Image (cartoon, rainbow, N blue to C red):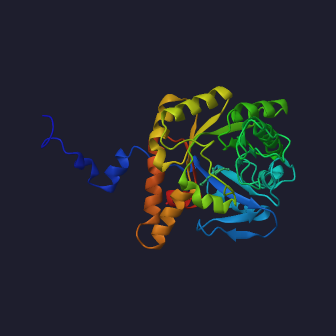
Amino acid sequence: MSGFPTVRPRRLRRTATLRRMVRETAPRIDQLIAPLFVRHGSGVVRPIASMPGHAQLSVDMAVREAESLAELGIPAVLLFGIPAHKDALGSENFDPDGIVPRAAAAIKRAVPELIVISDMCCCEYTDHGHCGIINTPQIKYYDERLAEGYLLNDPTLEILGQAAVVHAQAGADIIAPSGMIDGMVARIRTALDLAGLHQTAIMSYAAKFASSFYGPFRDAAESPPGFGDRSEYQMDPANRREAMREVTLDVEEGADILMVKPALAYLDIIRQVRDRFELPLAAYQVSGEYSMVKAAAEKGWIDERRVALESLTAIARAGADMIITYWARDAARWLRG
Ligand code: PBG
């Protein structure tokens, strides 16, 4: 009585209702996090050419967008700032009048229940586009033992700690350090606690790979590195064991939520983190994952909605509790039916 012809798995695929009954995974609106790009000005909606459907928004427009995302049931937004000025230290990142603190405050005022996450990195704010302080003789942190152009780890931590406090004081509920700087979680936790911000959570980009799938984002956030690439700090896409080590360190440093990024090409990492660690896990479906589908759909080669939902289902199936996705708004509509 084992095997075909007695056993026929197709019996449970015969009708839509049967398939619905045996479905194991479905992405939920509660899992979605919507990225927003904010810039100075008012009434600004500046479309991002490489990411159709997305735009850089001034704070007033970002507030409107946040309100409508919340109405759709989306629980959180992830803020990226485009500063007015860029410099070697990325000063606007720790300026209380900077673009992200302003946006965070305005969004929390308008939609208090919406969770505001701040992507904590230097690359949007530095004139060289790297995720921290770069070693050059012109800066006070210059270290002659290290190569010029090397990203200085510990001085960068100082800035991340300071900026995290500024963003949290403005209203960010969660700080999400994304620079793959050693010790960033511990340093941010300490800085937040010293400022009395014990309730501000840390969502760590724990295993973030030096990925070419970030291409369209660098256009969106105006943050391409001016020289070299990010492989001296982000992880080699080839390394799974090292990813587990990175995650372990962030757990030890006090992360509240872990993240794997990108998502679709790294489902094995998502699954392994899910199986090994108890903390909530986020996956970041990055700009390239979105724009490739958009471009192919525009050509009529694939069905955007079906491909997007299939990808989100796969990411949830791999074990992600939360999914940062540029389809958040569309997916919420689609999932509502
Ligand atoms: C760094 C950051 C990046 C992304 C999120 N945070 C860019 C990078 O590491 O080069 C990429 C997101 C995406 O591609 O959607 N602040």
Q: Which residue is drawn at 70% across and 43% down?
A: 150
Q: Which of 77 and 249 is in front in this view?
A: 249
Question: How far across and how far down the image is residue 50, in percent?
Answer: 59, 67
Question: How far across and how far down the image is residue 114, in percent?
Answer: 70, 49
Classify residue 332 by image quadrant.
bottom right
Of all residues, the one furthest to the bottom in this rendering is 299
Q: Nearer the viewer, residue 63 or 133?
A: 133
Q: Is residue 22 left or right of residue 208?
A: left
Q: How many marks?
A: 0
Q: Can residue 59 be seen in this view?
A: yes
Question: How far across and how far down the image is residue 93, in percent?
Answer: 80, 49
Q: Nearer the viewer, residue 150 or 236?
A: 150
Q: What quarter of the picture does the N terminus occupy?
A: top left
Q: Is residue 48 left or right of residue 41?
A: left
Q: Which of 148 and 121 is in front in this view?
A: 148
Q: Is residue 335 left or right of residue 47?
A: left
Can you say whether 103 is above or below 299 in the image? above
Q: Is residue 116 visible?
A: no
Classify residue 246 by image quadrant.
top right
Question: How far across and how far down the image is residue 70, in percent?
Answer: 66, 55
